[in-house]
Amino acid sequence: MTPTSSYTSSGTGRRSQEFTPTSALRGFLSHSGRRAADLSPGYERVWEHIAQITDAGRGLQQELVMTSVEAYPARPTRPVLNAVAASFELLHTAIVLRADADGLRGMTRAAHAADRVPSGSPQQHDDAAVQGAIAHAPGAVEGAPGSNPAGWADRDGSRADLTSAAGDLALTGAYRLIATSRVPETRMLRLLEILDESVFHAVAGERLVAQVARRTQPVPHDKALDAIRLAIAVPCYEAPLRAGAVLGGAPTAHVTALATIGRSLGVAHQLAGELRAAAGSPDAAGEAGSAGASPVLTPDRCTVAGVLVEAGDYAAEWQALRERAVRQPLGDDDVAHARDLLDRSGAARSVARMVDTAVRRAKDTMAATDLPPALVQSLIAWLERETAV
């Protein structure tokens, strides 16, 4: 008998092999939307928003799960794999939604502060910095923080509150997908541990980013790097690779090595995205989750490159651009000025060196561990493709 799963086959009776992690996730979201509609009019719009954010992603987390699990022989049936891969994709959605909610609140506070406080005052610098409190997770939907899809926000709640609620629902959905995946119990416990560690790290990263964003003095760039590791690299890169290895029955040493590799992949990918944004590459805005002309300077982002500029001789000019971005979209001249500051300050070159360091660390870990050759080849190919600037 062909194995089936409630979310991979969605009750259609079709063969489970026809379904993928993407279809598994869509089935789960559709089912949740129907449940929501039965409970309260308009509640399904929250689930529609979750689906919108999920569909806008690149599917990176499910790709990492499947790349890892397919390198090992003890993997379970396809419906189980689909559900677990979908779970970590939904975790990414939850992180994006939480970032959007905090960004909306931060931009509101910053805009109000900019209206009330005289330009150049310490208080304005402090409040305007809050708007940069979130380093977007990879694949964030373009324009999400500043847009208002039809029917999304209504008189029952602000966009920030509704987006926060959507993030909480996405997170509980990630747990539910694993709990109902029918994965063997011992592996399920390990997967839930990985998921729990991811959430624990992500929240710690959010708090660290908030601390950095409320700065009134320059901060070490290491703090911004730590925020990327905690808030993004662990839940969105390390966790999917580890989960796939656990599903495939990999040795503990391999799971541990993939944790180190995943963190390095995440840091390299995020920093490479900053460089592409600084260079104004065509895909930079979408990748960074920005609707503006310069993702490095948009109000809902805080970047390592920006922290580096603010620590040097061009801090005042950079801060002025950031404060202007709170009030209005930046023009082409502002964007060109930002790129010039990134170059003249040496921030772009420093970030490029950090990318090289992270890539080298990942490759060194691969070389020191007897990972399956096919997995090493896939990860190296991914690194070369995704960190190219």
Image (cartoon, helix red, strand yellow):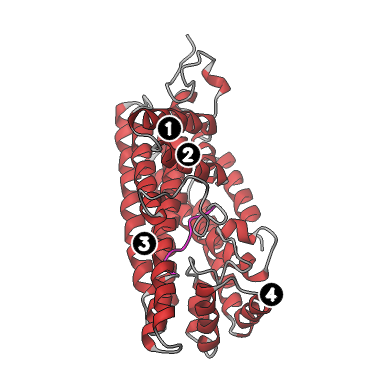
Give me the C-alpha separation between circle 1 and circle 4. Answer: 42 Å
Image x and y of residue 17, in percent: 55, 20
**Which residue, given by chain and number where applicable, does mark 4 sit on?**
332
Q: Secondary structure at mark 2?
A: helix
Range drawn in magenta: 132-139
**Which residue, given by chain and number where applicable, does mark 1 sit on?**
33
Q: Residue at x 54, y 67 (%)?
A: 357
Give me the C-alpha separation between circle 4 and circle 2. Answer: 35 Å
Q: Which mark is residue 48?
A: 2
Image x and y of residue 315, in percent: 51, 86
First-in-chain label (1 vs 4): 1
Mark 2 and 3 residues: CB-CB less than 8 Å, in contact? Answer: no
Q: Is residue 192 magenta?
A: no
Image x and y of residue 387, in percent: 61, 59
User: In the image, which is nearer the foreground, mark 3 or mark 4?
Assistant: 4
Q: Secondary structure at mark 1?
A: helix
**Relative to residue 13, is residue 223 drawn left or right?**
left
Quadrant for residue 87, please give it.
top left
